Image (cartoon, rainbow, N blue to C red):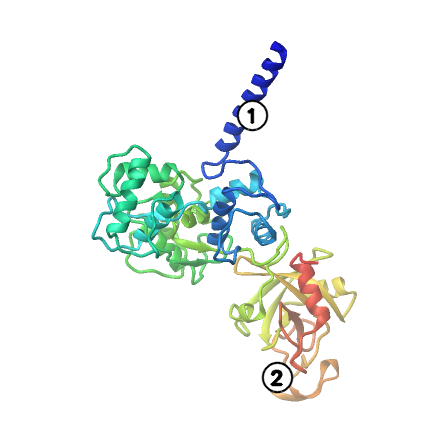
Amino acid sequence: MRKTVAAILTSIYIISTTSTALAAESQYLSLSGYKKGMEHDDIKVIQQALKRDGVFEHDQFTTYYGTLTEDAVIKFQRKYGLAADGIIGKSTIEKMNSLGLFTHGNLSLRVYKKGMTHSDIKIIQEALRDIGTYEGDTITTYFGSVTEKAVEDFQKMYGLTVDGVVGGSTIKKMENLGLVTHNIGVTGIIGNLTLPKYEKGMSHPEVKIIQKVLKQCGTFNEDAFTTYFGPVTEDAVKDFQSKYGLDVDGVVGTGTLQKMKSLGLINFIVSRGSVKRGAGEYLDWKNVKKLLVRNKTILTVKDLKTSLSFKVKVTAGSNHADVEPVSKNDTKVIKKVWGGFSWERRPVLVYLNNRTIAASMTAMPHAGVEGKPAGKYVSGRSGGYGYGYNYDFVKGNGISGHLDIHFKNSRRHKDNRKDSKHQACVKIAAGLQ
């Protein structure tokens, strides 16, 4: 009997300490793992976190872990390079934590009280509704009697001074409960960032957003915002990193981007769709097209199967990119990859502005004559194209005419239709097949 009681007590102790350890893994969740078929109050918290990240597309939150939740988890895991098993375990929880997805948002002021109107009031109301004290029909920016009553009930619940004011101790308690973050002066999403890294020497429209974020956080002291990432921006990034305990390298990479997102200052969307680690972005042609400038943009292209690389210049193309090798040596590499000039579609990675984009390419020169003026109507164009506009702009590269590079949803010029073989290769380059 004593042995039985001892065994039971030991089991209770183990369960108790295990539960404590599991809860300690996240201040927002009480278990260490969640999967399809489970029913638990934490599932609502998970769905709300996935909603904030943009992968859970439904407005109703439940305590049941069904197919919709599993699909959203898989999207989240693929988006951030995690094992896409649809199960929320340690690595997925850690990623959610690091992105600040479990909080309702950042509070930017020191005190909130009855009579105020401010965008942060929405965050307070959502946090109080989550905890069960806010019973208002709608979420608003106004701190009225209903919000004051909800704050007082919250303060009573946690043994705080009951004054209906959201100030020091009340905000601190909300922080400790994982309901909000509190960074004074930091308010509102400034913009969307889409690149995995920003560093000194870059020119990109999104550098302006970074500078505005740094200005908001007090580390960028200039009044004018530019698209250039220079020494001033680099120093401001270093100050930001130092301020928030990040690695100080002056580069806006994963850790810095995640911190900016957790502060509620940016949306950070780099991985698109189901992109596997080491593969290219599955980026739509309409978006790729915006990045290209005819007779100016130089692309580095890597053949996926051989890993051989070469450079091409974008010289034409409305439905897809028409490109020409930059030099004879680039032409030599292309012929080595394809075994000569060929219409064979091959999956390739295109490197442009610090991005890696999934694409498909052929290596058959067409629609041009090397020895005749570019942009003129000529006869004898390559690829059997006969008389017409001479699309050979890069001279001395060893080919007549241009080559084709296709991207997601790009089309042929001859009939304005998608080429199924090209599209299949693009998916391979994106890691989708």
Residue at left offset 58%, top offset 54%: 68
Q: Which mark is residue 15?
A: 1
List the single residue furthest toward the right.
339
Specify the quadrant of the image occupied by residue 331: bottom right
| x, y percent for residue 4 | 62, 14
> What's the amino acid at mark 1?
Ile
- Outermost residue to the left: 115
The reply to whether residue 235 is visible in this rendering is: no
> Which disc is residue 77 wearing?
none
From this view, report whether residue 259 is shown above or below residue 343.
Answer: above
Name the residue type under label 2.
Pro
Label 2, label 1: how far apart the Cα atoms are? 81 Å
Total label count? 2
Q: Position of residue 196 (x, y in %)?
A: 51, 53
Q: Are marks 2 and 1 in contact (CB under 8 Å)?
A: no
Q: Residues within 10 Å of mark 2 (few under 14, many from 20)?
A: some
- The foreground one among 141 and 345 is 141
Asked whether, in this view, residue 233 is left or right of residue 402, the answer is left
Q: Earlier in the sequence, mark 2 or mark 1?
A: 1
As drawn, 101 above or below 26 = below
Q: Position of residue 392 (x, y in %)?
A: 64, 79
Residue 128: image location, x then y, percent: 35, 45
Tell me the residue at 55%/74% (across/down).
295
- Helix, strand or loop at label 2? It is loop
In this view, the residue in front, 176 or 30, is 30
Mark 2 sits on what residue?
373
Q: Secondary structure at mark 1?
A: helix
Q: Is residue 29 something that shows in the picture?
A: yes
- Residue 395, quarter of picture: bottom right
Front residue of this view, candidates 190 and 136: 136
Of circles 2 and 1, the one toward us is: 1
With 121 as the anchor, is 275 left or right in this view? right
